[in-house]
């Protein structure tokens, strides 16, 4: 039996988690974040959100150490709950990772079309009032093909791209932040809050889990750790991802607020962050730099989500939670080749749906991470850890339950509309079909050794 290649080190796990976490959302929704909380409200909201995620990150660090299985949450749940619960958990997490891939592919067209307007031509059709342009589709398909081929070739190639993109992106962010520091004013920060201080912080906190999720993806590559990799480094990678994401958003929020009055950000513009810098510096090169940063972030997010989603699909198949054909491993490349190709084909097909059709599915995907986190905390609690571990698990269950309820309860603003319920129903139906394709007479292979979770 061919196993996955064991090549990953601590820096690779950090790049993977950060890549899943930081895509292009920071460029698109910065105006919404500032209007929710104001500069200080946004910074405090992100700080509160990241601190709340730390106990959940601790739980994941212990779980990955105890159960180094690419199925992640599905494997953790399988130890203590029925197989149908394990499948449902894994299926929701798969939606979270796999849906990001077509969104990043579509974003590639939007960003390049902003820099080169001639690409916004040859409209194929419209969906929900949004045009679908041939050059955008072609670019998205080309990017999908390249990244799918790269991941098929081996984890070393995709990990090398992930590291290069991550550190290039962080360097570019630092450059445009320093450039803005010479052309802004402290007075642009005022007023510090968009509403009352408490309300401003809470409004930002609501969106933080969606923007800072990704640390849990470390567990999806746990089987590919290099020989001699210390188990404690899984926790280190998770915590590094959370803190790096927090510092990144501090820098971006502070930079945008410094270069222009945050109330002046025009949400009707496609990329208000880039426009704010261009007006402050009176130069177009800063726009090219920011959009270039976004393209690098897009590549790192796309690549990292292909890695995470393909490993999850592969491992769920290996555990017979869905069709066993997805558990194939390339004999030479030692990659989950069938699952990688499946993710690539699904991404290519979904690109043609356009952004309008994907928005309701994205809303469902926004709570899927919370569902996975909740299941992980419940599983860790059942492992009977020490008092600190039990406290972290209980706290995580409370927080993740709140994250899910604010989307499901009809009297809470921002709850699911019928579009989101329909998308959830379709995804559930697809899940039922996928689960029905599993083998009926299946002998589970000996699982990876489980450590004592209390250690």
Image (cartoon, rainbow, N blue to C red):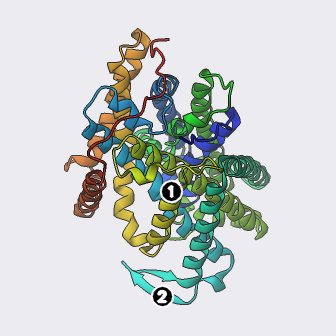
Mark 1 falls on what kind of element? helix
- CA distance separating discs 2 and 1: 31 Å
For disc 2, the marked residue is 124
Q: Nearer the viewer, residue 22 or 34?
A: 22
Left or right, 72 with reference to 273: left
What's the residue at 40%, 44% (across, down)? Answer: 316
Residue 263 disc label: none
Q: Quadrant of residue 73?
A: top left
Q: Residue furthest top?
A: 387
Left or right, 332 with reference to 105: right
Q: Quadrant of residue 11?
A: top right
Q: Nearer the viewer, mark 2 or mark 1?
A: 1
Q: What x and y, as percent, mark residue 445?
A: 41, 34
What's the residue at 38%, 16% (across, down)? Answer: 391
Is there a contact, CB below 8 Å, between mark 2 and mark 1?
A: no
- Classed neighbour count for the residue bearing mark 1: other residues with Cα under 10 Å, few (<14), some (14–19), many (≥20): some
């Amino acid at each position: 039996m061919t196993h996955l290649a064991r090549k990953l080190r601590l820096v690779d796990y950090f790049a993977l988690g950060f890549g899943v976490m930081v895509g292009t959302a920071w460029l698109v929704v910065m105006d919404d974040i500032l209007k929710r909380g104001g500069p200080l409200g946004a910074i405090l909201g992100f700080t509160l959100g990241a601190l709340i995620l730390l106990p959940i990150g601790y739980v994941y660090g212990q779980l990955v150490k105890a159960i180094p299985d690419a199925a992640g949450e599905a494997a953790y749940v399988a130890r203590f709950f029925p197989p149908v619960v394990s499948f449902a958990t894994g299926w929701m997490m798969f939606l979270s990772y796999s849906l990001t891939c077509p969104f990043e592919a579509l974003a590639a067209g939007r960003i390049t079309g902003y820099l080169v307007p001639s690409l916004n031509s040859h409209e194929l059709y419209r969906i929900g009032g949004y045009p679908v342009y041939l050059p955008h589709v072609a670019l998205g398909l080309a990017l999908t093909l390249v990244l799918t081929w790269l991941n098929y070739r081996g984890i070393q190639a995709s990990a090398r791209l992930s590291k290069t993109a991550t550190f290039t992106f962080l360097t570019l962010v630092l450059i445009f932040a320093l450039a803005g520091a010479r052309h802004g004013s402290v007075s642009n920060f005022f007023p510090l809050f968009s509403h009352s201080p408490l309300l401003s912080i809470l409004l930002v906190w609501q969106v933080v889990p969606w923007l800072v999720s990704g640390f849990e993806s470390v567990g999806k590559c746990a089987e590919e750790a290099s020989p001699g990799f210390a188990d404690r480094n899984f926790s280190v990678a998770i915590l590094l991802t959370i803190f790096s994401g927090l510092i990144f958003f501090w820098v971006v929020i502070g930079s945008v607020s410094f270069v222009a009055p945050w109330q002046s950000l025009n949400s009707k513009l496609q990329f208000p962050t880039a426009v704010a810098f261009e007006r402050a510096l009176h130069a177009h090169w800063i726009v090219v730099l920011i959009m270039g940063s976004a393209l690098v972030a897009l590549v790192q997010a796309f690549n990292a989500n292909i890695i995470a989603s393909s490993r999850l699909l592969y491992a769920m198949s290996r555990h017979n939670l869905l069709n066993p054909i997805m558990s194939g491993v390339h004999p030479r490349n030692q990659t989950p080749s069938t699952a990688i190709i499946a993710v690539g084909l699904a991404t290519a097909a979904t690109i043609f749906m356009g952004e309008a059709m994907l928005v309701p599915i994205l809303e469902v995907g926004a709570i899927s991470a919370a569902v996975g986190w909740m299941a992980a905390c419940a599983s860790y609690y059942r492992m009977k850890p020490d008092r600190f571990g039990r406290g972290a698990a209980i706290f995580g269950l409370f927080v993740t339950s709140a994250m899910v309820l604010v989307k499901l309860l009809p009297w809470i603003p921002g709850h699911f509309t019928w579009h989101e319920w329909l998308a959830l129903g379709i995804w559930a139906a697809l899940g039922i079909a996928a689960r029905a394709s599993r083998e009926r007479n299946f002998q589970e292979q000996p699982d990876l050794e489980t450590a004592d979770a209390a250690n």
